[in-house]
Amino acid sequence: MENLVNQLNAIIWSPVLVYLCLGAGLFFSVATRFVQLRLFREMIRLLFAGKSSDEGISSFQALAVSLSGRVGTGNIAGVAAAIGFGGPGAVFWMWIVALLGASTAYVESALGQIYKEEDEGEYRGGPAYYIEKAMGQKWYAWIFALVTIFACGVMLPGVQSNAISSAAEVALGSGAMIQTDFGEIGETKLVTAIAVVTVLGFIIFGGVKRIANFTQVVVPFMALAYIIMACAVVALNISQLPGIISLIVSDAFSPMAGIGAAIGWGVKRGIYSNEAGQGTGPHAASAAEVAHPAQQGLVQAFSVYIDTLFVCTATAFMILITGAYNVHGADGGFLLQNLPATVETSGPAFTQYALDSVLPGIGKPFVAVALFFFAFTTLLAYYYIAETNVAYIRRTLRVPGELTALKVVLMASVFYGAIRTADLAWALGDMAVGMMAWLNIIGLLILFFLGRPALKALKDYERQRKEGVEHYTFDPEQLGIKNSDFWRDRINKG
């Protein structure tokens, strides 16, 4: 199975997709006049400006929900894999993906807001909604919805749970080996899998409000604690930092793993981590209660910075500054080996060894705990995204018990992922991310040339901001934006 998945990934993650992601980010950056840089201060102001309502969550809650998806295993294990297979230069390309991808995040999240709907007392939206309403291609929207349900409900959860169980195993040891129908499993992995599934079930049966309330507390705390710990490691080795930055930049263009490997792994893991262009961010963005769609687009653009420029960079600096990494060549051998060959490259081990080298006895369990919160909140985000796309399909086709089935399947995927190998889990996750990115980015580019709704919303918001209005409004018909029913009805109601 792993060989088949790797063959499919080689097709999905061909150089075409890598350069499509970078090209789309550059294109949207130019089209928005680098909104991700121009309105940086406005992004920060908007984080705390919005209020929640009975139907929607606040801007900060929406940021927390989307960050719970963005800030996850990719920030710890993903960065390690990027360095391990692409060399230190892969980190530079993760930065480029973040800088350019922030504009893509603005576009897709603003579109999510423009074309959102109210569904059974909650706001819903995402690529399936804006593809159908703005592009008028319901079949394409259905393909995206079905792919997303399968990706977020089946393929991606295993990556997160596998990282949790792998980190626990590194920190605590394997424990006694237990014979099961899935083969021989370490006691630590099995107990971890059962615990994660139990807690996850309790929360996902509580709905989006419970998810938002949980993530708005956990996400800022876990990200801050992790960054503080990373900064402590860097501070203790501050004399090496200029050399590490120089290594990252120089290796980006003449990398030990080959420039194709550096760019490919940097872009792949960058998108996996910050999700810009993948199409997951707009789901949480659509649930926010805001006065203008551009506001949530800006907030979501800022979340890309938090994810990659803060959290991923913290991980990369820790790994590189302590030398706790290996680099694999294309032939499977080592181009650089600082750790034993048995250390898993696709897991969180590099990060755990890096922190443990500075804080012996503390580093490994701390990363395990941090990774639990990072990955667990990502699992919640995956469920919410899958649920939103089930709700989209349910508008046309109702299947009794579909949400209950989704919850059970997701929990089964989490359990299975926790006890399987990291390489298979990551390969399935890469396939899911690649399929969603293909569908969403092509859709975004088509929508831009069809009517430029996200750009029109941005210009309208900047006009009102320049005029110093006290209360922002959004009138889609006045801007020539069709099928934005939610905002049209709000204007009509006064």
Image (spheres, rainbow, N blue to C red):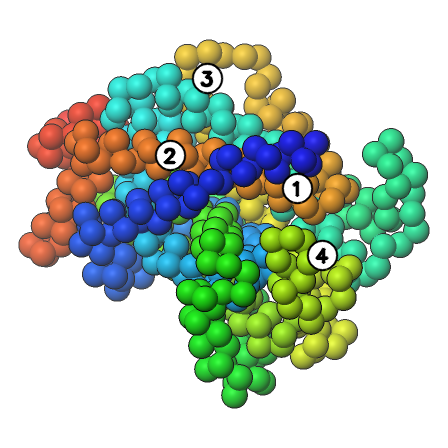
Dot 3 and dot 2 residues touching (CB under 8 Å): no
Q: Residue furthest bottom?
A: 239
| Res. 159 image quadrant | top right
What residue do we see at 51% from left, 54% from top? 261
Q: How many marks?
A: 4
What residue do we see at 57% from left, 72% from top? 320
Dividing the image into 4 quarters, which one contains the N terminus? Answer: top right
Between the C-alphas of marks 4 and 2, the distance is: 32 Å
Q: At label 2, which amino acid type do we have?
A: Asn
Indicate the position of residue 317 as horizontal and vertical percent values.
Answer: 53, 72
Pick the residue in front: 75 or 66.
75
Q: At label 1, which amino acid type do we have?
A: Ala
Q: Earlier in the sequence, mark 4 or mark 2?
A: 4
Secondary structure, mark 2, is helix
Q: Mark 2 — residue?
A: 440
Dividing the image into 4 quarters, which one contains the C terminus? Answer: top left
Q: Earlier in the sequence, mark 4 or mark 1?
A: 4
Q: At label 4, which amino acid type do we have?
A: Glu
What residue do we see at 42% from left, 20% from top? 142
Between the C-alphas of marks 1 and 2, the distance is: 23 Å
Secondary structure, mark 1, is helix
Indicate the position of residue 83 as horizontal and vertical percent values.
Answer: 56, 62
Q: Mark 1 — residue?
A: 425
Between the C-alphas of marks 3 and 2, the distance is: 21 Å
Q: Earlier in the sequence, mark 1 or mark 2?
A: 1
Vertical placement of 148 versus 260: above or below? Answer: above
Pick the residue in front: 274 or 122.
274
Q: Mark 3 — residue?
A: 394
- Left or right: where does residue 138 sit relative to residue 383? left
Q: Residues within 10 Å of mark 1 (few under 14, many from 20)?
A: many
Q: Mark 4 — residue?
A: 344
